[in-house]
Image: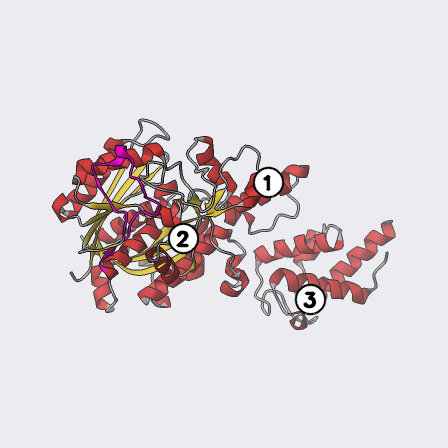
Amino acid sequence: MNRVVITGRGAVSTFGTGVEKLTEAVRQGRSGVVFIKEWEQVRGLNSFLAAPVPPLDIKKLLPRSVRRTMGDMAIYATLAAVEAVDDAGLDREFLESGQTGAAIGSTTGSPGVYEEYYRNFLDEESFQELRSGTFFKIMGHSCSANVCHALKIRGEQWATAGACSSSSQAIGLGYLLIKSGRQRAMICGGADEVHHSVTMIFDILKAASRNHDPPLHTPAPFDADRDGVVCSGGSGILVLESLESAQARNAEIYAEILGFGHVTDSDHIANPTEDAMFTAMNQAMLEAGVIKEKIDYINAHATGTEHGDITEARAISRVCGADVPVSSLKGHLGHALGAAGSLETILVLEMFNCQELLPTLHLKRPDPACLGINLLQKKQKARVNTVLKNNFALGGVNTALVLRRWNI
Amino acid sequence: MTMDDNAIRQQVVEVIAEEFELDPKDLRPEVTFYEDLDLDSLDAVDMVVALEKSFGMKLSDEEAFRAVRTMDDLFNLVISLKKMIEQER
């Protein structure tokens, strides 16, 4: 069984393109959440908040030959993947070897392009003026296929469609494929884009924030006054590699992946289940051979919903007790859905690098129902070596990763 | 209104330049789509959509379109189609 390490990171987020913009903004305690005025026109929608990726001059960033089959999410994934492979120092030969694969997920294909497609079609029940690239923008594996095409990847291609757990599933899958020796390296992560149809999913369930009054202090995971999620867009991509491969080419190693917990709960299609969260975290720690006393920090999924945050707090309390520091980064980032796991993992890597824990933004008054765990409200210097990273998705996908800083 | 042949050629160049982000100066009559401009079968689909939209007519002769290799072939195809449509009116 191979050991699996992380050797590259790439990101597109609400703070712009690049890992540096992401880490700098979050370390400065900034939020990407804004009020979306145009959404007030959408009848039935009650939440007008999002943390979108700022406008990109994509013609300058990607040539038409790769861009023509990409909606926004595939563009984000490709830009992040290019940064990640560059960060890892992977050359063309390595990427094309057949020993490098990709696992990149998203909630659906591009919702922006779905809207465009149906606007075009529904008027006159006509497919006319449809460009050849349209299907490739809306197909479920748009991100993975486009990234593989752009980077000339010839290994295994997987598209992990697991909503809020898409990218953590991708990281877990990459970990399993390298561990078993099927692939030497995997480009792993996820992407999603801001669109009212995505926010609507949460809004219908009364789980989207309607806290519109400035200054915006939402989403507020674990806070007593939280009122739901704020969706965001972007992509996080990691290069996972076997330790042997990384050392053979003298690569800089950020962290090792020690364990991956992956559990479905089937009690309710939408509601979170404490036992499943607990089991996913335990599974990851068992596989990692790590006891709770060795966990320095837990990066929570917590999105700012009433039930989700409480359920996760209870599960964390059962797994790790009341001492381990816990925070969610969704106050800064919003909920990046398919990109959440990978973007948040990149921030965990930053915490390893800086030996500093990042708090939950907007957490002013912890919900009494979430007490029983050590909720971080301020940045703090700390020994950060071993981290438990959670992501839990609608549809019952519960994931947990154990990550350890390299060269402790 | 009838267009003269040069105006049609100019419009074809503009459509292709815009659709494929190419420099109009590079779209000389002898230039080939596949070899010189590196366009492929997906681009061929988009080319038809863009031309039909710009000229307001269907490029319905698929066989004739498949035979197009150069900008000049395309000019001639669009010119002859336009003439045919104008005569039918």
**Residue B33 quadrant:** bottom right
Can marks 2 and 3 be said to lie on one chain?
no
Q: Is residue A200 visible?
A: yes
Can marks 3 and 1 be said to lie on one chain?
no
- Secondary structure of the residue carrying tag 2 is strand
Q: Which residue is mark 3?
A: B71
Q: Which residue is mark 2?
A: A235
The residue type indicated by label 1 comes to Tyr
Q: Which mark is residue A118?
A: 1
The residue type indicated by label 3 comes to Met
- Percent x, y for residue B8? 78, 63
- Percent x, y for residue A201? 46, 35
Residue at (28% x, 41% y) in the render:
A399
**Residue B47 quadrant:** bottom right
Q: Is the Cβ of the residue at disc 3 closer than 8 Å to that at disc 1? A: no
Instruction: Measure the C-alpha gap from mark 2 to mark 3.
Output: 40 Å
Instruction: Measure the C-alpha gap from mark 3 to mark 1.
Output: 33 Å
In this rendering, position of residue A151 left or right of residue A290 = right
